[in-house]
């Protein structure tokens, strides 16, 4: 039995022995939103609430396991994001930090990559249904959300999160999640992505460039930029040799060698030189490969935005390998990356979603 199935069938007595669950004990929460107590108590209540939902029980086994894991891990980052500010308690950023932390936990446990990313995406957005219908352009937000997350699964996580607490406005939370579910159902994207007109429409909507779900932008590109994404030793160079052997490559590893910059030193000058070489290709409307780890969205966006500014098509290629294999492959490289650097990259790994490019290839 795999770890997700084990978790979904385990008792709280067993689950609370997990080290990152134990870390939730004593982590205070704002009494306005969480009068039930600390994060540890809240998480137990959320799991109890989820197990009591007929809509969760009705899911296929693998989907139940994914939703359960998302609920178990949804507040995993609160131990280090929680702050006491005057008389209030805040955990700003815990959803995004939790998605990153959950990804590392699940990766090290060998969870199947698509299920791992489904869980991380649910954690990233686990608060969204509480507020989506009250914000601007809610239909666009639901359509965009559906490109990366099953909206029916997200509604279940959010519903359990609302039921597993004592707060001042439980009726409002329940109403908003029901409206989110209804809106996704009416848009036809409850259990699948909203059908956008083309890849460019999805790209523009994902970058919040004033795009609407109704847009059908023309797809005319001067060239294509392949943005590699993956930890050192995952196999990015092998993919390039096998799939783009004749394309020019802007390699940050190669630039580090040219510039004599150690991987443990600041990488700003290397990245700046890489972007200048990318501009040379873009000005010439020449397709090329950007070969770097690109493990955070911020780093990817610098290249993606540059490609967009020059009217290029963006293709993100994600290459990953299990941790033990990655360490072995990295050890066999001529330009071996120190393991401490690998650990730091893994701890910040943000997976590229479909909306971040015109195309995404995922090799695992």
Image (spheres, rainbow, N blue to C red):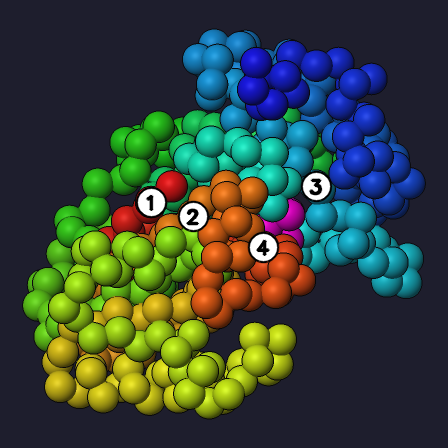
Query: Would residue 156 be visible to someone looking at this image?
Result: no
Q: CA distance from mark 4 to mark 2?
A: 11 Å
Label 3's element? Answer: loop
Q: CA distance from mark 1 to mark 2?
A: 6 Å
Question: Observer-nearest residue: 222 or 336?
Answer: 336
Q: Which residue is mark 1?
A: 363
- Looking at the image, tell me whether mark 2 or mark 3 is earlier in sequence order: 3
Q: Are marks 1 and 2 in contact (CB under 8 Å)?
A: yes
Q: CA distance from mark 3 to mark 1?
A: 29 Å
In the image, which residues are magenta?
Answer: 97-102
Q: Quadrant of residue 5?
A: top right
Q: CA distance from mark 2 to mark 3?
A: 26 Å
Q: Is residue 117 above or below residue 358?
A: above
Q: Which residue is mark 2?
A: 320
Q: Which residue is mark 4?
A: 346
Write the residue at 71% across / 48% down. Answer: 77
Quarter of the picture holding the N terminus: top right
């Amino acid at each position: 039995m795999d770890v997700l199935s084990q978790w979904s069938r385990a008792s709280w007595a067993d689950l609370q022995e997990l080290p990152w669950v134990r870390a939730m004990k004593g982590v205070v929460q704002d009494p306005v939103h969480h009068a039930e107590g600390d994060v540890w108590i809240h998480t137990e209540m959320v799991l109890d609430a989820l197990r009591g939902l007929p809509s969760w029980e009705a899911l296929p086994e693998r989907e139940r396991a994914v939703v359960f894991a998302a609920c178990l891990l949804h507040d995993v980052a609160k131990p280090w994001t929680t702050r006491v500010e005057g008389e209030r308690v805040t955990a700003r950023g815990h959803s995004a930090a939790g998605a990153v932390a959950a990804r590392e936990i699940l990766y090290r446990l060998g969870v199947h990559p698509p299920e791992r990313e489904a869980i991380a995406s649910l954690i990233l957005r686990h608060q969204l249904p509480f507020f989506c219908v009250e914000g601007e352009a809610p239909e666009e937000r639901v359509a965009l959300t559906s490109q990366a997350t099953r909206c029916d699964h997200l509604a279940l996580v959010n519903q359990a999160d609302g039921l597993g607490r004592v707060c001042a406005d439980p009726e409002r939370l329940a109403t908003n999640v029901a409206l989110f579910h209804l809106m996704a159902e009416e848009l036809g994207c409850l259990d699948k992505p909203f059908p956008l007109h083309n890849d460019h429409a999805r790209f523009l909507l994902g970058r919040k460039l004033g795009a609407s779900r109704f847009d059908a932008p023309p797809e005319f590109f001067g060239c294509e930029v392949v943005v590699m994404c993956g930890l050192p030793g995952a196999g990015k160079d092998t993919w390039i040799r096998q799939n783009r052997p004749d394309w020019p490559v802007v390699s940050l590893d190669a630039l580090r060698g040219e510039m004599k910059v150690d991987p443990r030193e600041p990488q700003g000058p290397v990245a700046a030189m890489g972007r200048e070489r990318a501009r040379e290709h873009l000005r010439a409307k020449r397709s090329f490969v950007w070969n770097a780890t690109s493990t955070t969205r911020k780093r990817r966006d610098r290249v993606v935005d540059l490609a967009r500014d020059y009217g290029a098509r963006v293709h993100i290629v994600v290459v990953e390998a299990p941790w033990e294999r990655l360490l072995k492959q990295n050890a066999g490289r001529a330009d071996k990356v120190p393991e401490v650097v690998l650990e730091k990259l893994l701890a910040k790994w943000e997976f590229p979603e479909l909306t971040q490019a015109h195309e995404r290839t995922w090799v695992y």
